[in-house]
Image (cartoon, rainbow, N blue to C red):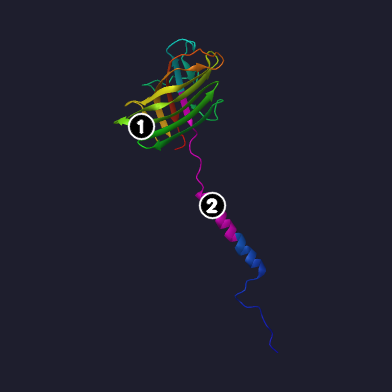
Amino acid sequence: MNRRHPASCLAHPRSRRARFSLTAAVALVTLVACTDSPGPAPRASSRVAPITGGCNTGPYLIPANGTPTTETTVGTRVEDGKSGADVSCSVRQSGSGYSIRGSIKQGSSFFVTGQVAQTGEGTYSGTGSITFYAPAADTVTSNTCSITVSAVQEIGDGKVWASASCTDSRQGSSAGRSCDFGASFILENCES
């Protein structure tokens, strides 16, 4: 009488589970190892200086008590999630230039969208919109801003230091009131 024994190539049910668990663990470790770790938090600053009446006197700064960012000076930046700051931004290559979007909030707020193209060695210019809010000025919006990156400023994937000159702005709660204003801003560690 021949007794049948399980074939030696078939694993015991428990060992199959052990192999499955080991395989799942290796896959999980590989997945975690391949996941990008978050980069540094976005940082930013802005300075808005009214040129004509209607927006009070300014300048309006974020951060309020820091060194201001100007056309030639890099000022103090606020970092997303620290000291009540909320910063989000993207600076992406687009054609011969860059697409810019940024939002900075810390007491006051500053929003910019625009597109710049290369105009020379390390210089860019284009157009965009800027909205800022400061308690003394209310909400001010201009859709006719000239945005420039000069030779002393900088732009690249995920970062920009630029200036703007804005006209035909409108104040939120005071229909018909307007001012022209200049702005300088820095956006860093942005999406690219």
Q: Which mark is residue 88?
A: none
Front residue (pair 127, 19): 127
Q: Quadrant of the N terminus?
A: bottom right
- Per the rendered image, the range of residues in magenta is 22-45
Q: What separation in Å lies between label 2 and label 1 (alpha carbons)?
A: 39 Å
Looking at the picture, tell me which residue is in the foreground, 45 or 19.
Answer: 45
Q: Residue furthest front?
A: 176
Disc 1 on helix, strand or loop? strand
Please, which residue is most extreme toward the right here? 1
- Looking at the rendered structure, the kind of residue marked 2 is Leu
Q: Position of residue 31 (x, y in %)?
A: 54, 52
Q: Residue at x 43, y 24 (%)?
A: 185
Total numbered circles:
2
Q: What secondary structure is found at the residue carrying circle 2?
A: helix
Answer few, some or many: residues within 10 Å of disc 2's Cα (few below 14, many 20 plus, some between 14 and 19).
few
Q: Is residue 11 left or right of residue 122?
A: right
